[in-house]
Image (cartoon, helix red, strand yellow):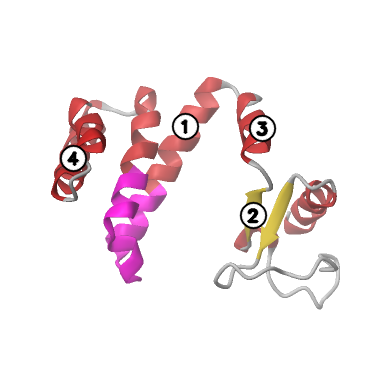
Amino acid sequence: NDIDLGLHLDEAIGEGMITRLSARRGSFCSSDDNYGSSEYRSAPSSIMYKFSHDRIQQAAYSLLPSDLCCKMHLSIGNAILQLRAQGNHKRFATDSFLFAAVDQLNRGTSFISSDQQIQLARLNLQAGERATASFAFETSTNYLKV
């Protein structure tokens, strides 16, 4: 539940492993949030967190089984595509979100069906064309090779 999640995340925050960002435009929450009180208005799952350092993120990632990593990348890529398709915010329609989605999906290819492979090939083509249009030729080549 959210209270348990919040308490576990607080431990990691206290140890300096992660930083809590508010759900609103990346501003920081106060360090004395109390998940068990009625004053706490936002569920921990609705708040964004980030690792305090890239090395911490890499260490945490290395502890995950490879099949779980692939599934997570696939899930993240699909979530980004879903945000783009909903069109609720202009920033999700930018090329950077297309690139982010395709990068994540490419890392989860071992768990996609043949129909999804065709869709991913189209997305890689689209990303490659957008990268070429931006004169990002090396990036474009990476998408078009897949």
Q: Is the residue under label 2 in contact with that under label 3 (CB below 8 Å)?
A: no
Question: Vertically, is 130 above or below 65?
Answer: below
- Which of marks 2 and 3 precedes in the sequence? 2
Q: CA distance from mark 3 to mark 2?
A: 14 Å
In terms of image quadrants, where is residue 58? Answer: top right
* Part of the protein shown in magenta: 79-101
Q: CA distance from mark 4 to mark 3?
A: 31 Å
Percent position (x, y) of residue 50?
63, 51
Q: CA distance from mark 2 to mark 1?
A: 20 Å
- Residue 60 disc label: 3
* Picture residue at 24% right of the left edge, 36% below the top: 120
Write down the residue under mark 4: 128
Write down the residue under mark 2: 49
Q: Is the residue under label 3 in contact with that under label 1 (CB below 8 Å)?
A: no
Quadrant of the image containing the N terminus: bottom right
Percent position (x, y) of residue 109?
34, 27
Nearest-to-viewer mark from 4 and 1: 4
- Residue 71 disc label: 1
Nearest the viewer among 58 and 92 is: 58
- Which of marks 3 and 1 precedes in the sequence? 3
